[in-house]
Amino acid sequence: MSRPRRFATTLLSLGLAASLAGWVTAQAAEPSKPAAKSAESPPAPATARTVKELPFPDGEKWPTATEQEKMAYLLGVMNMALVEYQLHGPNPRHRTTATKLVKATNGMTLRQMMQTIDAYYQANPDQQKRPVFEVIWFEMVEPKANVKSAEPSKPAAKKG
């Protein structure tokens, strides 16, 4: 990769990571509630906002998440895949999951993806420990991409 392209890739990656980190932090912070003003009460001491810990999403946490939290998670997954896809194109030189993810979910909305995940966890109560990304990969991507993740791809036979 040429030096200017490597620099641009690094800069874009750092910018995206920083913006996503800032957005997640802003979304995770509890909104401050306005206090009722009273002439007799002293001013409230300045306190830092309490930040909610974001759990790693699985089938136990997914059903209790709000629609906005589910959509934010899926938006983050798809944004990262689309950035990698844009940087490396449809036929990357190095192994990547982004191409398969982008192609398999082409035409799907985030809401459709959310409904597919919801339906999976409802239909499979014994799979509540399974991470959401595994559901996305094995239930949405792999069937459409015709991929065997457990088996390494076999090299093409050499023509002699």
Image (tube, rainbow, N blue to C red):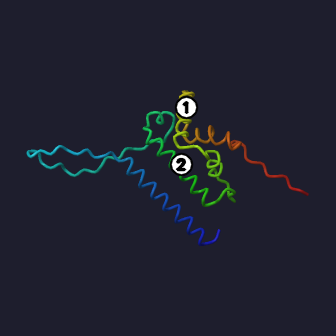
**Horizontally, is 40 left or right of 34 in the view?**
left
Labels 2 and 1 touching (C-beta < 8 A):
no
Q: Residue furthest left?
A: 40
**Quadrant of residue 135 within the rendered picture:** top right
Q: Nearer the viewer, mark 2 or mark 1?
A: 1
Q: Amino acid at mark 1?
A: Ala
Q: Nearer the viewer, residue 109 or 58?
A: 109
Q: Secondary structure at mark 2?
A: helix
Q: Residue furthest front?
A: 107
Determine the secondary structure under disc 1: helix
Q: Label 2: which residue?
A: 77
**Residue 31: x and y, percent?**
31, 46
Image point (69%, 44%), residue name: 145
**Tag 2: amino acid:** Val
The residue positioned 62% from the left and 40% from the top of the image is 140
Q: Is residue 113 left or right of residue 156?
A: left
Give the percent coordinates (x, y) of residue 147. Answer: 70, 43
Q: Which residue is mark 1?
A: 119
Badge 2 crowding class, 10 Å Cα cut-off, few under 14, some 14 to 19, many 20 or more, is: some
- List x then y, in percent, for residue 32: 28, 46
- Label at residue 148: none
What's the CA distance linking mark 2 and mark 1?
19 Å
The relative height of residue 59 versus residue 39 in the rendered view (above or below) is: above
Image quarter where the N terminus lies is bottom right
Q: Return the disc, 2 or 1, that comes first in the chain's sequence.
A: 2
